[in-house]
Amino acid sequence: MTQQIHPTAYIGSDVKLGDGIIVGPFAVIESGAVLGDHCEVGAHAVVHGHVRMGAGNILHPHAVLGGLPQDLGFKAETVSWLIIGDNNVFREGFTAHRASKENAETRIGSDCFFMNNSHVAHDCSIGDKTIFANNVAIGGHVEVGNNVFMGGAVVAHQFCRIGAYAIVQGTTGLNMDVIPFMLVGGRPARHYRLNTVGLRRAGITGERYNVLSAAFRLLKNKKSLDALEETPELKFLKDWLAVKSKRGLHGFIEVSAD
């Protein structure tokens, strides 16, 4: 399959483009960038030279990938990267910056959807099948797990962790970690309950769900999880909690997990 590159687009001299690439009017792909098969770069979108992406990614107009970190101490000659998996959608105005340290990486997984004007800062790590709604902005060094949903205008402080299968209500400000499998919202942010809809869609139902429900209640009461049946989800949760947090955990509200 041949490439379709608009005559007004700028393609750097040593760009590596896969098969079936589509590049729209006035798009820019700088020297050194690597794009896998069947990627689409919309009108006026920009792919900077320190970007490595897999196949099937779609950049809508005015998306910008791999820009300089918004770090006052960063030196432009630093060699760092933005690494992207496969089959992601980056809507209009999306931005993601490369890492702030020599040979470090900002990473975005596969099958994610980033809506208008959302932002991934330097040194962040985004898992697979995660969704950022409009105007989500995360600071540097934030970790977002697989299958996370970030509601509109959510913001996250540097070094926060948002665990897998979590959902964050729109306009929530995060300055601490979000526990996997749970719903967070409010001002200040609090853990409300399990992400019931997300877990059901992922097939985490029946006894697997019941174990997580019991784990939520135990965590809320600051009790050990060791007596629970160790399902794959509980093992993941315990391993995640065992990692030392730089921000601490958001608190709970008195609402049933069921």
Image (spheres, rainbow, N blue to C red):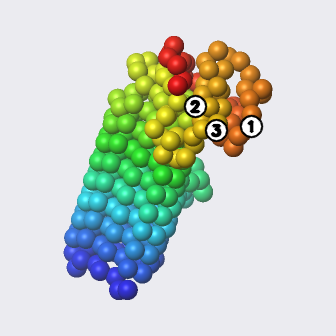
Identity, as a three-letter code, of the amino acid under mark 3? Arg
Q: How far across and how far down the image is residue 151, in percent?
A: 37, 36
Q: How far across and how far down the image is residue 166, in percent?
A: 51, 36
Q: Residue furthest front?
A: 206
> Helix or strand or loop: what does disc 3 sit on?
helix
Q: Earlier in the sequence, mark 3 or mark 1?
A: 3
Q: Is residue 248 above or below residue 85?
A: above
The residue under label 1 is 230
Which marked residue is nearer to the observer: mark 3 or mark 1?
3
Report which quarter residue 154 is drawn in. Answer: top left
Q: Residue at x 66, y 20 (%)?
A: 218
Local packing at callout 3 (Cα closer than 10 Å; few below 14, some 14-19, many 20+) is some
Q: Earlier in the sequence, mark 2 or mark 1?
A: 2
Quote the CA–CA distance across marks 3 and 1.
Answer: 9 Å
Q: Which mark is residue 208?
A: 3
Q: How far across and how far down the image is residue 61, in percent?
A: 25, 59
Q: How far across and how far down the image is residue 232, in percent?
A: 69, 43
Q: Residue furthest bottom?
A: 2
Q: Are marks 3 and 2 in contact (CB under 8 Å)?
A: no
Report which quarter residue 79 is drawn in. Answer: bottom right
**39 sits to left or right of 77:** left
Which marked residue is nearer to the observer: mark 2 or mark 1?
1
Q: Which mark is residue 23?
A: none
Q: Residue furthest right?
A: 227
Local packing at callout 1 (Cα closer than 10 Å; few below 14, some 14-19, many 20+) is some
Q: Earlier in the sequence, mark 3 or mark 2?
A: 2
Q: Residue at x 34, y 82 (%)?
A: 3
Identity, as a three-letter code, of the amino acid under mark 2? Ile
Q: Residue at x 67, y 16 (%)?
A: 222
> Helix or strand or loop: what does disc 1 sit on?
loop
The residue under label 2 is 179
**194 sits to left or right of 136:** right
